[in-house]
Amino acid sequence: MNLIRTALRRASFVKTIIKPSDTVLEIGVLRGQFSEKLLDANPNKLILIDCWKVFSADVFCDYLTFTSKHWDKMHDKVKAKFEKHSNVSIDRNMSADAVSDYDDNSIDFIYIDANHAYEYVKEDLALWFPKVKVGGWIGGHDYNLKDDVEKAVKEFFADKQGTVIITSDMPSSYFYNKI
Ligand SMILES: C[S@@+](CC[C@H](N)C(=O)[O-])C[C@H]1O[C@@H](n2cnc3c(N)ncnc32)[C@H](O)[C@@H]1O
């Protein structure tokens, strides 16, 4: 695996890889802000997966002040935001539970932005990588937010041919074109 940096930020980079025939899947949606950028790139289909639920601090240490009510409201707002887009589907589910709903080699681009702890990033990469078509892309956010994502990404792609591309925004994203 090689690692290179691009001057592009994630929203610009995805526009260079998403084609009009593509099925794109985002794991970890929150308020749907990056989902809007993915939709701006005009994919054929956009699938949004997020559990929108309360976790204990030892499992997911972000958004700990959010109650179930907050998460329900956020989910409803994301649903409303994309309601008029018939090519967007929303799956309120855990990443590891949702994965069995998708065939291997069926998704053009998967973007992982859920739990950023080392073991979860590694698990998400291992579970979702087979779902990406050969020639498609897999990537994710917060490469350099803390060591966990970078470590998991470097380990996961270490034995793979090809290049991991790191974007210039902070925190940056990583992208890998599946061979
Ligand atoms: C950093 S936010 C996503 C931000 C969004 N991608 C953006 O750029 O605007 C992380 C989201 O991942 C979700 N999440 C965390 N762990 C998850 C898991 N195991 N399965 C599904 N969703 C998860 C959380 O509910 C939260 O909404």
Image (tube, rainbow, N blue to C red):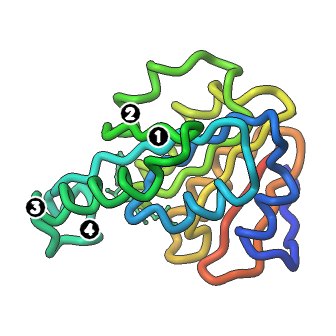
Residue 117 makes an appearance in the image: no
Residue 101: horizontal and vertical position, in percent?
45, 20
Going by the numbered disc 2, the residue's amino acid type is Ala
Mark 4 to mark 1 CA distance (whole Å): 17 Å
Q: Characterize the local packing of mark 3: few (<14), some (14-19) or many (20 or more) Cα atoms within 10 angstroms.
A: few
Direction front: furthest residue: 84
Return the x and y of residue 90 as percentages of the image width and height. 42, 40
Lower position in the chain sequence, tag 3 or tag 2 = 3
Tell me the SS state at disc 2.
helix
Which residue corresponds to the image point at 47% horizontal and 40% vertical from the top-left? 123
Labels 2 and 4: the sequence-earlier one: 4
Q: Is residue 3 left or right of residue 26?
A: right
Q: Where is residue 19 in the image (x, y as percent from the top left)?
A: 84, 43
Q: For residue 70, which quarter of the picture?
A: bottom left
Q: Name the residue under label 3.
A: 69
In space, the residues marked 3 and 2 are separated at their CA atoms by: 23 Å
Q: Mark 2 — residue? A: 96
Whole-Å distance between the Cαs marked 1 and 3?
28 Å
Q: Mark 1 or 3 closer to N-term? A: 3
What's the CA distance linking mark 2 and mark 1? 8 Å
60 or 90: which is nearer to us? 90
Q: Mark 4 points at which residue?
A: 61
